[in-house]
Image (cartoon, rainbow, N blue to C red):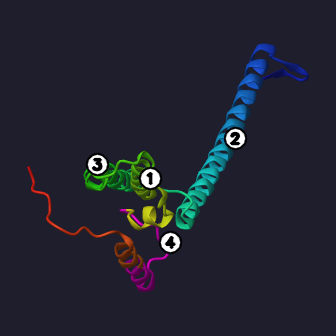
Amino acid sequence: MKISRGKYDLKASVQRYIAFIKEQAEKTEEELDLTKEKTLLTRANRQKVELELQIMRGELHRSEDVRRVMNNMLSAFRARVLAIPSKTAPRLLAQTDLAVVQDIIKKEVYEALQELSEYDPHVFYAQSKDKLAIDTDETEEESSEEADEETAEKEPRRNGRKKAKK
């Protein structure tokens, strides 16, 4: 603040200068925050697009889809393993040769293990509750329905009686 020609109030001038510096620093921080936020948003959008692309390629599966498919797969495996005794017992009854008994049991175990080796990543996508579609139109919906039908045809069908609900 000017008192007279060539003379200034030191205390008032220093306070005004400090206030000016603080104001400039706040403007710079706001600009930096805005730049930082834009960078974070851009990074998040890029990551989202990359994840969507991985899902579309079948390289990434949703956890609930994996859980559902694995539960189905392990349930079928469990049923196969539990069926081994009743399936092999009649064939083993008359056998006296240890090598033949072991061979029969081994074949049944390998058959049950085959259930676990039938991994197909398309099953995860086909059973997904929310399919990812970028531009949904009638042609994509039709191809999605065709894929569902193909998957249903590949899945084993149960024959026999249904289990009674308890």
Residue 3: say if magenta.
no
Q: Distance between the residues labelled 2 and 4?
A: 34 Å
Q: Earlier in the sequence, mark 1 or mark 2?
A: 2
Q: Report the disc number at residue 32.
A: 2
Q: What residue type is labelled 1?
A: Asp
Helix, strand or loop at label 1? It is helix
Q: Are marks 3 and 1 in contact (CB under 8 Å)?
A: no
Residue 143: say if magenta.
yes
Instruction: Give the residue at mark 1.
Output: 103
Q: Which amino acid does label 4 sit on?
A: Ile
Instruction: Give the residue at mark 4.
Output: 134
Q: How far apart are marks 1 and 2 (CA)?
A: 73 Å
Magenta span covers which residues?
Answer: 129-146
Is residue 51 shown above or below 144? above
Q: Nearer the viewer, mark 2 or mark 4?
A: 4
Q: Earlier in the sequence, mark 4 or mark 1?
A: 1
Q: Distance between the residues labelled 3 and 4?
A: 50 Å
Q: What residue type is labelled 2?
A: Leu
Q: Nearer the viewer, mark 4 or mark 1?
A: 1
Observer-nearest of 20 and 52 = 52
Is residue 36 shown above or below 8? below
